[in-house]
Amino acid sequence: MEFIRNVFLVEERIANTNEYPFTIPAVRALDGLSFSQVTYFVGENGSGKSTILEAIAVALGFNAEGGTKNFKFSTRDSTSSLSRSIRFVRGPYRPLTEFFLRAESFFNLATQIEELDKVPAYAPPIIDSYGGRSLHEQSHGESFQALLKNRFGPRGLYILDEPEAALSPSRQLWLLSRMHELVLDESQFIIATHSPIVLAYPGATIYEVGKDGISRVEYDDTEQVSLTRDFLAQRKRYVERLFAYVEKGTTPEGQ
């Protein structure tokens, strides 16, 4: 099920197209982008994929640092104006549950849950929806798994920003299986990732974000997959070349 089908830029809401983030080629290419049940954004650091994902989440009503739409905390205001300049074409149905997972601020989310549960309330503790055990008392990967296992449910809209950050390769495979359970239960995922494993959901829409904007690509043609495959096939040659750059006092990026 697709709760979000398309995203468009609303030109009259853009104060200045020559200011960040509208100077990012990918942001300008966002206009008219379509989403499937599982949609990925891939690209180099700084390409704009996380900026786009955050803007989509905030425009939908999520807190910029993650969580459900009920979370309103903020430890640092870094939200771009892009969220105020986009609109969506939605499907005929609304999700039953929603969550924005942002790896870099997940610690803040876990802290906020603990702070809210200190306040007397008639409702059950919030942490009960996350497995009943403090997320801070678990490893980063375990807390991610607890979230995905306990808080995510059928017919949900889930926006994930680099979920692999806390997950080992085996747990990334578990993430794929959990995603499939939820997709079969009519959930939709929008994900930014660097991981070839997380990226491997069959039939997903993959957008590559870069200096030329946004282009749709196949799994095998993404840089993550092709570079990883090449490295594993020729590991010794890659390492020797990287070390040779270091010994010359330079780096591959400087060539």
Image: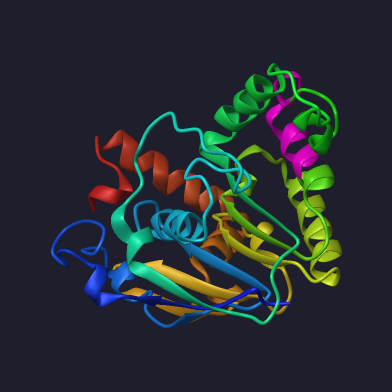
State the count of labels.
0
Residue 22 appears left or right of 245: left
Range covered by the magenta-colored residues: 135-147
Residue 43 percent coordinates (x, y)? 44, 61
Magenta segment: does it hold 119? no
Q: Residue at x 65, y 37 (%)?
A: 166
Image height check: is 160 above or below 200? above
Residue 20 appears left or right of 132: left
Name the image quarter holding the N terminus. bottom right
Provide the major secondary structure of the magenta segment.
helix
Q: Of residues 151 and 43, which is closer to you in this image?
A: 151
Residue 234 percent coordinates (x, y)? 57, 57
Image height check: is 60 above or below 71? below
Q: Residue at x 82, y 63 (%)?
A: 182
Residue 138 percent coordinates (x, y)? 76, 24
Residue 177 percent coordinates (x, y)? 83, 59
Q: Residue at x 32, y 42 (%)?
A: 245
Q: Residue at x 33, y 36 (%)?
A: 246
Residue 171 appears left or right of 22: right
Colour treatment of the image? rainbow
Q: Residue furthest front?
A: 122
Residue 245 appears left or right of 108: left
Magenta segment: does it hold 141? yes
Q: Give the quarter of the image for residue 102.
A: top right
Q: Of residues 75 and 236, which is closer to you in this image?
A: 75
Image height check: is 159 above or below 78? below
